[in-house]
Image (cartoon, rainbow, N blue to C red):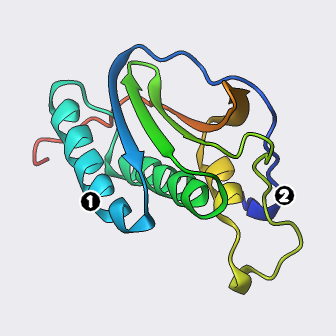
Amino acid sequence: MEVNVSEQHWVQQPPPVITGNIWTWRLESTDQLPAVRAELRGLLSLVSRLEPVSDIEFEEKFLLAFDELASNALRHGGRPVRARVSFGSEGLLVEVSDSAATSPPTPAVGRDPSQGGLGLGLVAALASAHGWVTQAERKLVWAFCRRMAPRRRGAFG
């Protein structure tokens, strides 16, 4: 099924509550994102050894969602930007907040894909659920990726 990423809507609704591991970052620049992504990849890998997430493809989709939300906040929101990832039995939740509380996430609609601006639509297409809220004069944009049962491996991996 093909999904038009420019037609994904962002509804004002609170994120699900996820219990489990929680990691947070304060972001000042997009220059930080490669290091934060690498750190998050390592944390997911470490936790997955104890409690398998699903598969590498799931982790990569989640990392892409994290990166898109964080870079959008850094480019279009107000600083400071805070990112939080929750890892629980239900799935993975990324929450990114910025000080642009009056600016809702606005996906690019009708724009030529070569001009960019498709990040929010891409996140919406990848996530099981997504939304945003205003909390304490901050905008919080979130995406939840539901865990699937890990694939069983054959005798040779």
Taking the image as shown, residue 18 lies to the left or right of residue 105, namely left
Q: Residue at x 80, y 66 (%)?
A: 108
Residue 153 visible in the current orientation: no
Image quadrant where residue 111 sits: bottom right
Q: Amino acid at mark 2?
A: Glu
Q: Is residue 55 above or below residue 68?
A: above
Image quadrant where residue 29 sits: bottom left
Q: Is residue 53 above or below residue 20?
A: below
Q: Residue at x 73, y 39 (%)?
A: 101
Query: Which residue in the protein does label 2 denote?
Result: 7
Label 2: how many residues lie within 10 Å, few (<14), some (14-19) or many (20+)?
some
Q: Is residue 68 above or below residue 47?
A: below
Give the percent coordinates (x, y) of residue 3: 74, 59
Query: Which residue in the protein does label 1 denote?
Result: 35
Mark 1 and mark 2 lie on one chain; the one further toward the N terminus is 2
Q: Amino acid at mark 1?
A: Ala
Disc on res. 3:
none
Residue 127 visible in the current orientation: yes
Give the percent coordinates (x, y) of residue 127: 60, 42
